[in-house]
Amino acid sequence: DYKAVSKRIIDFVEHHHYQLIEKLAEEIAQIILSEFKTPWVKVSVGKPGAIRGSRDVGVSIERHRESGAHSAPR
């Protein structure tokens, strides 16, 4: 249910603040894995204007519920 996931993540982001987008991505992934019982999730988070001269800086992570395994860096 994409609508339920979107509402939950929007609510979470509106009420929490992070300095690192990596930490935010991890928290979002854990919410989706635990609350929505998905076996796998890929989360991408961007921070426009984080570095001068760059349009956007971002991170993508993949997580699996059963093992919590980290994907290989890209």
Image (cartoon, rainbow, N blue to C red):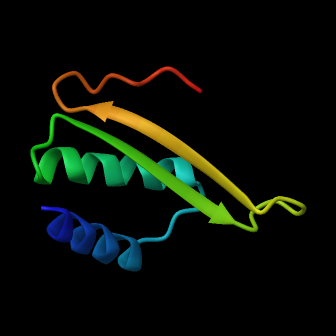
Question: Seen in the image, is 34 located left or right of residue 60?
Answer: left
**Residue 62, image quadrant:** top left
Q: For this view, does 41 lie left or right of residue 61?
A: left
The structure residue drawn at horizontal position 23% and vertical position 74%, both measured from the top left corner, is 7
Residue that sits furthest to the right in the current view: 53
9 on left or right of 52: left
Up/down of 23 relative to 67, above or below: below
Q: Quadrant of the N terminus?
A: bottom left
Q: Closest to the observer: 39 or 27?
A: 39
Q: In which quarter of the image is the C terminus?
A: top right
Give the percent coordinates (x, y) of residue 18.
52, 63
Instruction: Count the labels in the image.
Output: 0
- Give the left or right position of residue 5, taking residue 72 as reference: left
From the top left corner, tell me how far across and down residue 61 is, in percent.
45, 38
- What residue is shown at x 36% (from left), y 52% (from top)? 27
Residue at coordinates 59% horizontally, 54% vertically from top-left? Answer: 20
Which residue occupies the foreground of this view, 61 or 17?
Answer: 61
Residue at the front extreme, as displayed = 2
Give the residue at x 39% y 79%. Answer: 14
* Image x and y of residue 72, in percent: 50, 20
